[in-house]
Amino acid sequence: MTFKRIEFKTKNLLKQTMERYNTRALQAAQEGIPVAWVTAVFPVEILYAMDIFPYYPENFGAAAGTHRRTEELSKIAENEGYSARVCAYTRAGLGLMYGFSDFGKEIPKPDILLPCNIQCACLYKWFEITAKFYNLPLFLLDGPQIDEPSWEVQKQYFIEQLNELIGFLEKTTRKKLNMNRLSEVLELSTEACTLWNKVLASAKTKPARLTYWDACILMGPIVTLRGTKEALNYYSELSKELEERDKGNISAVPGEKIRLYWDHIPIWPRMRFFSELFGFHQAAVVCSLYTHSWAYRFDPERPLESLTENYLREFVNWKFERRVEKKVKLMREYDVDGFIFNLNNSCKPNSLALVEKRNVITEQLNIPGLLLEADMCDLRFFDEGTVKNRVESFLEMVSRQ
Amino acid sequence: MSVKQVIAEIRKELDNFTAVRKWKEETGQKVIGWFPPDVPEELIAAAGALPVGISGFRPETRLAEAHLPRYVCSFMRGSLEMALRGELDFLDGVVFPHACDTKKHIVGLWERNCRFGFVHNLLFPRQLNLPSAQKYYRQEILRFCSALESFTGSKITTEKYQHIVAIYNQNRQLLREILRLQGEKQLLSNEDFYLVVMSSMLMPKTESNFFLTKLLNELTHGKGSQNMVPVVLSGSLVETNGFLKILDNCRLIAVGDDLYTGYRYFCLDVDGEDMLGGLTKRHFNQIPYSGYYSERHQKSEFLASLATERRAAGIIFIHLMFCEQENYEYPEVKQYLDRKNIPSIRIELDYQTQAWGQLSTRLQSFAEMLGVV
Ligand code: SF4
Ligand code: SF4
């Protein structure tokens, strides 16, 4: 293959930022900073405001996938009685917990576990197992689905739980939440999200300045560090770089001919394969609800309400129709020629209705959609030959249209 | 009349949902299907509709497969298949409790493909620890009530509710008594026992009470055999053919369970005097379930004490393939049971691809280990 991804000049800054985050995570214990395990969709701003270190074990799951360790770790979990059909992030984390005594050296051992079930039940189940294993306190933040038009009841429930969460944190960590500090963090978080979305929007231009494959790597700080100055710093540098790319008319995929939407999580261990496969065919994957998830806008004047409005109304928490609407909106904005949905063995909640959604969207937008069947991490559920063939014939079809 | 005759009568009522169709024809009222677990049927009935529990397994699910990925549990796959085939054409609406991710996300497919006039998402709290949960549960109940009332056009009055609750409580008492006798006399096969439980979900409760009373009468006078080895079942639900037949052949008899088509369905009565308080109390005192997080209720302890109390020789986990939340809980529960020297076995069922022969062999050796001769 001849396609070569263009590196970012800010690559080192990203590396440093993430390394610092990971080192700090592992050092926190020594410094007496409490470490909380959190899920991706969790009002982490509260933790930053309380100087509690939030660690995202999902990142470990993704990294295990990228470094092709999922199978090895999963087998340990499978030996313990977990099925190979549960989410691979959780299998990796459980494998590490059961199989490696130096658990705390690779990922920080939590002091408290703070799952939120807006994304899925898998994460809180994993956290629950970990909490029992180490005998640690856990707080489940429960986010019922939004069933509009009547979501007032759910909203009040969530706000009340945030208050309970704060009480729980204050009790377990003996730290006090300062509301002014929370407002500051919310502002930082909003700014970082704004910058992040500006970064993503540079794939709107034709040709796109970055691809989804890039965004999956560049999103590290918005996931882990939103609400901190570091995230802000990195994304302002990155967005400058993208402005430069724009001025220099640099396209992420030289000779871009096709623009595509990819739904949700990439197949981590084969990111490069995909990026090159699409690149080779001059196809730019320009958007995904996955990378666009971090688009929070908080009102620092009404912290808890605003956290609720943002987190409870995350796209993953909507019903079928609204989720389709969100996808369609993004596809329109980025003017794509087709889309790819992966029936992810690991992520059942996000792929359960994709077959149907593909049909609905194709009908609405009159563009084709490809269905793949693979695991996001576990290559035992990935058949490269089949995937390659399917992608190639799909791209051929798109370019004919 | 013998036990066998009563069972045959019940079976006839369930065949092609005869009892439900008859009721609908006679009353002209609406029928609302609900998915287990924990939907307060009493409210549906008090709003003038007939609640019907949906559990469905189909060996072949061609129609559903056109809409679903492979990794959906047989229950959700099978019930969608039934709907798509028109077998649930008597339903006017459905209620989905968001007790697992699969149920939560399959609703959209039902809405699009089945076109019921009423689809309600019951968004019960999935943590049972915090004060917020109880408060929210009450709010969700009220939201459910008003949705029901506007669909059926009939108010849920205190009188109606209390009348319904009395009938429903009686139904549960009858089922509990039948279960108790199973432990004592083992007069019903596993297949028949669970058919009886399910029959209560599939006919008007007054009719169910009539049959259950009749059955109980026979059981009380019947002589037990006691040649089967008692076990406890754990999982979400069982279907009456397939697995239970094998269990019968292996001479193992269920004397307790935590299934939503079993003990969970009838273990707790509600207090009719205070609607919100009564329903909340029942919900929060339910036996452990993998879909809810609770610090107080541990499945491991619950199962161990159930086995002891019911004098079961072992526990059989019947998990549906691809049911993640059950699987996550299993290793910890299993270890706990091992420590307590309670033998257990886990089988993963997929009604569409099940190798029944293999399963039978495994259960046979488990039975032998438990002392079935
Ligand atoms: S990949 Fe899906 S199932 Fe796994 S943790 Fe993320 S949201 Fe949950
Ligand atoms: S068996 Fe499991 S996955 Fe299936 S409906 Fe029940 S809880 Fe959900």
Image (cartoon, rainbow, N blue to C red):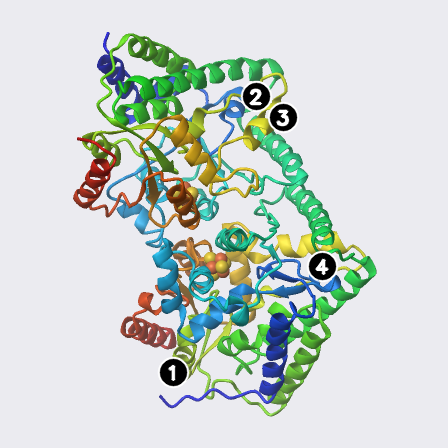
Q: Which quadrant of the render holds ligand 2?
A: top left
Establish whether labels 3 and 2 are both on one chain.
yes
Q: Considering the image in quadrants, where does the N terminus of chain A appear?
A: bottom left
Q: Which numbered disc flags the more N-terminal residue, 3 or 2?
A: 2
Instruction: Tell me the subunit letter for badge 1.
Output: A
Q: Please tell me whether mark 2 sits on a helix, a strand or a loop.
A: loop
Q: Which residue is mark 4?
A: A46
| Residues at marks 4 and 2, CA–CA distance in whole angstroms | 45 Å
Q: Considering the image in quadrants, where does the C terminus of chain A appear?
A: bottom left
Establish whether labels 2 and 1 are both on one chain.
no
Residue B53 in view, yes or no: no
| Residues at marks 3 and 1, CA–CA distance in whole angstroms | 61 Å
Task: Using residue B176 as the reference point, say whether residue B280 is left or right of it.
Answer: right
Is label 3 or label 1 in front? 3
The image position of residue B354, as x and y in percent, is: 23, 45
| Residue at 24% in and 44% down | B60
Q: Which residue is mark 3?
A: B276
Q: Please tell me whether mark 3 sits on a helix, a strand or a loop.
A: helix
The image position of residue A363, as x and y in percent, is: 42, 58
| Residues at marks 3 and 2, CA–CA distance in whole angstroms | 19 Å
Q: Please tell me whether mark 1 sits on a helix, a strand or a loop.
A: loop
Q: Please tell me whether mark 4 sits on a helix, a strand or a loop.
A: helix
Q: Which residue is mark 2?
A: B154
